[in-house]
């Protein structure tokens, strides 16, 4: 196994995890809601009265965060993600994630961060399923379809 040390960023990943955990806890304490992105986005499809503003603000904040980050931190601190697919691969992946979150009644942030911290058995099964599916897809892509060359 080879590690791509250029894109291996444990400190950035740890910082991101801490920020996500603190944001999830604060959201739960202040709003009594679970910080699940698919639920927040899905709530815009059939919004309750007075429930649309905070959802739009939250999603706009997520969309604007990378731009604000690049304004605050020097260019050397910004590591662009490596994506080894084209536009259609991203579209297909997005659709697969959308279907998966619908089937699992939530996304990785909702189940993996919030659900597990609440000791939800359903979230444990969902998170284990997400992880197993991810491991399986990577294995199949790298060792079966690409013949071990990746």
Image: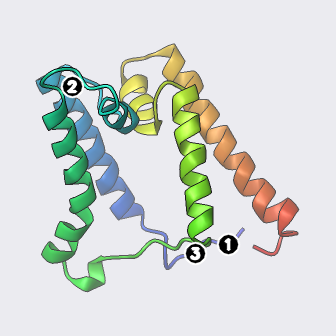
The residue labelled by disc 1 is 2
**Label located before the other in sequence (3 or 2):** 3
1 and 2 marks in contact (CB < 8 Å): no
Q: Residues within 10 Å of mark 2 (few under 14, many from 20)?
A: some
- Label 3 to label 2: alpha-carbon separation: 36 Å
Which x, y percent locates residue 115? 41, 24
Where is 24 relative to 79, above or below?
above
Q: Quadrant of residue 42?
A: top left
Q: Quadrant of the N terminus?
A: bottom right
Element type where label 3 sits in the image: loop
Element type where label 2 sits in the image: helix
Q: Which mark is residue 147?
A: none
Residue 46 horizontal side relative to residue 116, left or right: left
- Label 1 to label 2: alpha-carbon separation: 39 Å
Question: Residue at position x 63%, y 32% from top?
Answer: 129
Element type where label 1 sits in the image: loop
Where is 32 relative to 112, above or below?
above
Question: Residue at position x 74%, y 47% from top?
Answer: 136
- Label 1 to label 3: alpha-carbon separation: 6 Å
Q: Which mark is residue 28?
A: 2
The residue labelled by disc 3 is 4
Which x, y percent locates residue 95? 57, 47
Give the image's coloring scheme.
rainbow
Question: Residue at position x 62%, y 55% from top?
Answer: 92
Q: Residues within 10 Å of mark 3 (few under 14, many from 20)?
A: few
Q: Quadrant of residue 13?
A: bottom left
Question: Residue at position x 61%, y 40% from top?
Answer: 131
* Viewer-side residue, 147 vs 45: 45
Residue 142 horizontal side relative to residue 105, left or right: right
Where is 2 relative to 45, above or below?
below
Q: Quadrant of the C terminus?
A: bottom right
1 and 3 marks in contact (CB < 8 Å): yes
């Amino acid at each position: 196994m080879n590690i791509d040390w250029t894109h291996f960023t444990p400190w950035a990943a740890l910082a991101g995890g801490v920020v996500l955990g603190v944001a999830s806890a604060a959201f739960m304490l202040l709003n009594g809601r679970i910080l699940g992105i698919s639920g927040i986005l899905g709530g815009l499809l059939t919004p309750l009265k007075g429930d649309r503003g905070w959802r739009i603000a939250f999603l706009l904040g997520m969309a604007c965060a990378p731009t604000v980050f690049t304004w605050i931190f020097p260019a050397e601190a910004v590591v662009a993600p490596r994506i080894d697919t084209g536009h259609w691969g991203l579209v297909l992946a997005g659709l697969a994630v959308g279907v998966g979150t619908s089937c699992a009644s939530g996304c990785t942030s909702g189940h993996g961060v919030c659900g597990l911290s609440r000791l939800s058995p359903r979230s444990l099964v969902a998170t284990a399923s997400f992880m197993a599916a991810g491991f399986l897809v990577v294995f199949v892509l790298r060792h079966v379809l690409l013949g071990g060359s990746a």
